[in-house]
Image (spheres, rainbow, N blue to C red):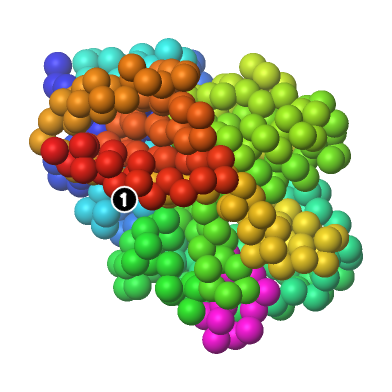
Amino acid sequence: MTALTCFKAYDIRGRLGHDLDEGIAHRIGRGFARALDARRVVLGRDIRPSSAALEAAVRAALLAEGVEVLDLGLSGTEEMYFATTHFDADGGICVTASHNPADWNGMKMVRRGSAPLDTATGLAAIRALAEADGFGAGRPGGVARDVAAEARAAYVARILTFADPAALAPLKVVVNAGNGAAGPTFDAIAAALAAQGAPLTFVRVHHEPDGRFPNGIPNPLLPENRAATGDVVVAEGADLGVAWDGDFDRCFFFDHRGGFVDGEYVVGLLAEMFLAREPGAAIVHDPRVVWNTQDIVARMGGRAVQSRTGHAFLKQAMRDAGAVYGGEMSAHHYFRDFVHCDSGMIPWLLVAALMSRKGARLADLVEERRRAFPSSGEINFRLADPAAAVARVRAAYEPAALARDETDGLSLAFADWRFNLRASNTEPVLRLNVEGRGTDIGPQVAALTALIAG
């Protein structure tokens, strides 16, 4: 039995030729079919050069297990999520490494009902089967069907239910697909919006899918990648900028000045929108930066529910709480009416609708919240001994803390500031977030940074 290092907390990710190759992908595909007893599976892929071959290996594995494969071809992860429920499939797989380096690839997977997979809900069983590699004879009856056109049409129709196209103001929007998978899907949405009377004008940046990523790996969360969108917003005199990661399940915003809008404030905006529609509803949030969201939810009469960080955990918390919306500061946004899954296309449409309804710029919508609840942004540390760093922080700060939470990493709260320190689920990184209540958090950020760095 060969141990497979590409299995992470809730998906598959690894370096090509080291953690993942076509043979391993084939074993994972067969394990997926066996563990879920799947008869129908949705399959898609991103634009990376290795994705087509890995997708072919997974398809062959599913066919060997007698599965009806519904093939999306080039698509976003969220299109796979939606199609899994739309076609009443037993599960779905998207071959993607999202924003990871070019020599990486992976898979995101769901089970029936687009429900998440983690070690407790099937991922461990898939891993055990793939590692044992004792599949033997398969099942007859495997067949592949191309459903790309049907699936995308249904997906676009669902996206447009989140806002009234005719009620949108004449906004100019810069959209940056990062040469990832977003371009064709966005074009289908834009065409449908225009057909329904939306007076939106779009400026497309790095729009063509190109798995060589000539303009860099599409990860707008990195500060060095933000100018590619923000500068065009300013140059074009646009009202809004939007950028996506490689498989476009994350959506990032820029105001009219080209300024990056941190994800925690977007979570607050969307929570307020949904609570205005459904008073008393539950809103799920991650534990890294919480005070702004909790304040808005309380003020709007909603119920704030905290979840462990990560899409599998947020999705399950959404289902458990019956939440209408959930959001992470990392720009994942989850919607009950989108099969309880995350979408990178719904958020920008909602923000455009909010700007239209209020006649306000995005910068104005978030400025008050930034003053009330300043945030450091996520600070990452690559350390030889992350556990020792966490121990140093705990010893120095825990005795004076007013509250402690270990939902995900270590969170300690004080009178007017709070921090969360956690290990990444997908990278060998320690992540720090600091937030405050109308106070300067600079001294706390500096002290924690120095202590963590050793």
Q: Residue at x 56, y 40 (%)?
A: 437
Residue 5 place in picture, x, y as percent: 20, 29
Residue 322 place in picture, x, y as percent: 72, 21
Q: Residue at x 53, y 24 (%)?
A: 307
- Is label 1 in a helix, a strand or a loop? loop
In the image, residue 183 sits, relative to residue 13, either above or below, namely: below
Judge from the rendering whether residue 331 lies leftward or rightward of residue 382; answer left or right.
Answer: right
Which amino acid type corresponds to the residue marked 1 in the rendered image?
A: Asn
Q: Which residues are magenta?
A: 232-243
Judge from the rendering whether residue 307 lies leftward or rightward of residue 163; answer left or right.
Answer: left
Judge from the rendering whether residue 198 lies leftward or rightward of residue 319; answer left or right.
Answer: right
Provide the residue designation for mark 1.
Answer: 100
Q: Nearer the viewer, residue 290 or 95?
A: 290
Q: Is residue 298 visible?
A: yes
Q: Please state, as top left, top right, bottom left or bottom right, where the C terminus lies in the image.
A: top left
Name which quarter of the figure residue 167 lies in.
bottom right
